[in-house]
Image: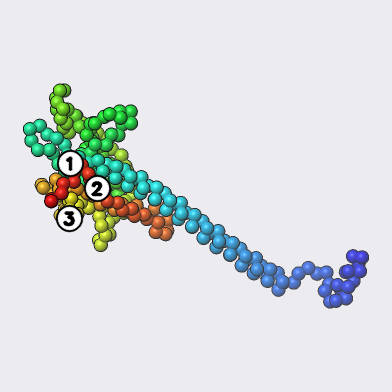
């Protein structure tokens, strides 16, 4: 049977001599096209996966940073003083830094702890958003008042990183408003001062998480306005 098939092929002018050079070239071209398509799909999927993972990481970091900022700002409060007016909650209010007194309790083991905290947010040279806190202490063992001095316990941590540099035509990290919604604008590179610090009633936060580990732009921007209910004083 096989001999018969070979005889018919030979009689048809196709001797058993393998594939010809043109056929080999065509096969190699088809293989190269398939390989190029598969390689392109793989590269595209790898880039998309890298972008998605980096974006997800940035969203998580930005969310954690925004939650930390909001939690502290929301509980800002003035600090009562002995025989004088309360100390304003804010002592520094700049576009990329803020220092203020807050009532947040960072120790879950002491639910009834009412010790005030002084918290500072700032962006360092590496564009890390840093949080520094220190606990108030009593000026005397029997005093009901609180002060911040050299003995106040201090802690520091990175809240999120890296934070993007603010574009020239965009809102900065922190913006400050009084109870009537009027923006209190610090001078470039300076802090609000005097009555302006005492007038702060809300803070608008624009947190930009910088592009990381991707050739595509996967930066994340979160915006939130925090009402400082302990500090709100209407003018009417």
In three-dimensional space, the C-alpha distance between marks 3 and 2, rounded to whole angstroms, equals 13 Å
User: Which secondary structure lies at badge 2?
Assistant: strand
Of 146 and 131, the residue lying toward us:
146
In three-dimensional space, the C-alpha distance between marks 3 and 1, rounded to whole angstroms, equals 19 Å
User: Which secondary structure lies at badge 1?
Assistant: loop
The earlier-in-sequence mark between 3 and 2 is 3
Q: In which quarter of the image is residue 18?
A: bottom right
In three-dimensional space, the C-alpha distance between marks 1 and 2, rounded to whole angstroms, equals 14 Å
- Residue pointed to by mark 2: 227
Q: Left or right: 55 with respect to 80?
A: right
Seen at 65% across and 68% down, the residue is 30
Q: Which mark is residue 202?
A: none
- Residue pointed to by mark 1: 89
Q: Quadrant of residue 69?
A: top left
Q: Which residue lies furthest to the front in this view?
A: 236
User: Which secondary structure lies at badge 3?
Assistant: loop
**Other residues around mark 2 within 10 Å, as few (<14) / some (14–19) / many (≥20):** many
Of 77 and 19, the residue lying toward us:
77
Where residue 209 appears, x then y in whole percent? 34, 52
Seen at 33% across and 53% down, the residue is 222
Number of numbered callouts drawn: 3
- Residue pointed to by mark 3: 182
Of 47 and 91, the residue lying toward us:
91
Q: Left or right: 42 with respect to 123?
A: right
Where residue 147 appears, x then y in whole percent? 16, 32
Seen at 68% across and 68% down, the residue is 27
Can residue 92 be seen at all in this image of the molecule? Answer: no
């Amino acid at each position: 049977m096989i001999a018969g098939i070979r005889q018919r092929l030979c009689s048809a002018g196709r001797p058993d001599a393998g594939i010809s050079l043109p056929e080999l070239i065509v096969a190699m071209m088809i293989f190269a096209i398939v390989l190029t398509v598969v390689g392109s799909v793989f590269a595209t999927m790898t880039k998309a996966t890298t972008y998605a993972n980096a974006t997800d990481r940035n969203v998580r970091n930005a969310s954690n940073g925004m939650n930390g900022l909001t939690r502290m700002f929301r509980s800002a409060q003035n600090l009562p003083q002995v025989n004088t007016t309360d100390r304003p909650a804010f002592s520094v209010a700049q576009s990329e830094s803020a220092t203020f007194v807050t009532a947040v309790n960072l120790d879950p083991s002491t639910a009834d702890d009412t010790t005030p905290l002084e918290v500072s947010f700032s962006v360092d040279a590496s564009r890390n958003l840093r949080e520094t806190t220190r606990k108030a202490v009593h000026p005397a063992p029997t005093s009901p008042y609180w002060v911040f001095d050299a003995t106040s316990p201090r802690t520091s941590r990175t809240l999120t990183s890296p934070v993007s540099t603010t574009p020239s035509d965009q809102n900065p990290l922190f913006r400050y408003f009084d109870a009537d919604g009027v923006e209190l604008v610090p001078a470039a590179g300076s802090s609000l001062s005097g009555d302006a610090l005492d007038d702060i009633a809300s803070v608008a936060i624009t947190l930009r998480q910088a592009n990381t580990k991707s050739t595509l732009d996967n930066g994340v921007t979160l915006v939130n306005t925090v009402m400082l209910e302990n500090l709100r004083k209407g003018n009417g």
